[in-house]
Amino acid sequence: MKKMALLLLFVVMIASLVACKEKMLKPDDTIGEMKLLSFCEGAIVNELCTYEELDEGTCVVPAGVKDLWVAYGWGEETAEELETAWKDSVWKLTFDDHPIDLAPFGTYDIDTSDPLLGPMKLRVWNFCVSNITPGKHHARYDFYLPNAYERGNHAHDWTFTVLEP
């Protein structure tokens, strides 16, 4: 009888832990009034603010911005180097303390230029917040790149404030 009670207690504890784990959000999920999208016609947060402002939490998004790309990615000098860097990489995102399942959002590639390195190939996550609410928001990208020129663990913490209309 004691063994059965211990087994039942163990099953209840495991079930409780699984039930308490927060669901990872995907495209079309909501956080309050905000909707998460894999595409929108919005502003890009790191074009509205510098990386320093985002890192320091002093970034201010103007009133009236309804849809906001909060996208980050990785760049290399060639498409081949980008494919190698992206291969086996592991990415995590939390937005306003909610875990995001990045894979369903997908990525897109762009050509850009770095002032020091010259032309670059960049892959960026398709993460957009529609109907973004006024107030302070926080995004954290954690990623591991085993094959990039800057191998290892990386993180970017961005805090920005959307002004009231």
Image: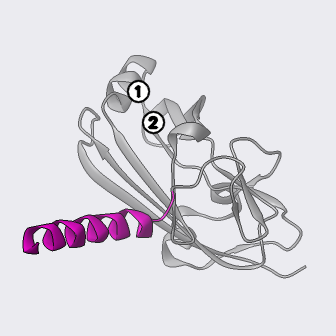
Q: Amino acid at mark 1?
A: Leu
Whole-percent x, y for residue 90 in the image: 34, 42
SS for callout 1: helix
Write the residue at 42% across / 27% down.
77
Q: Is residue 89 above or below residue 24?
A: above
Give the magenta part as a residue range.
1-23
Q: Is residue 81 above or below residue 99?
A: above
Predominant SS along the magenta part: helix
Q: Give the camera-side residue of 89 and 79.
A: 89
Q: Residue at x 37, y 62 (%)?
A: 18
Badge 1 density bin: few <14, some 14–19, many ≥20, Cα 10 Å: many
Residue at the disc numbered 2: 75
Vertical comparison of 60 with 66: above or below: below
Q: Is residue 138 above or below residue 39?
A: below
Q: Quadrant of residue 58?
A: bottom right
Q: Is residue 4 part of the magenta span, yes or no?
A: yes
Q: Residue 147 at x, y = what percent?
A: 25, 32
Q: Is residue 134 left or right of residue 116?
A: right
User: Which residue is more in the foreground, 130 or 115?
Assistant: 130
Specify which label sits upstream in the sequence, 2 or 1.
2
Mark 1 — residue? 82
Q: Residue at x 59, y 50 (%)?
A: 71
- Please state which amino acid type lies under the numbered disc 2: Gly
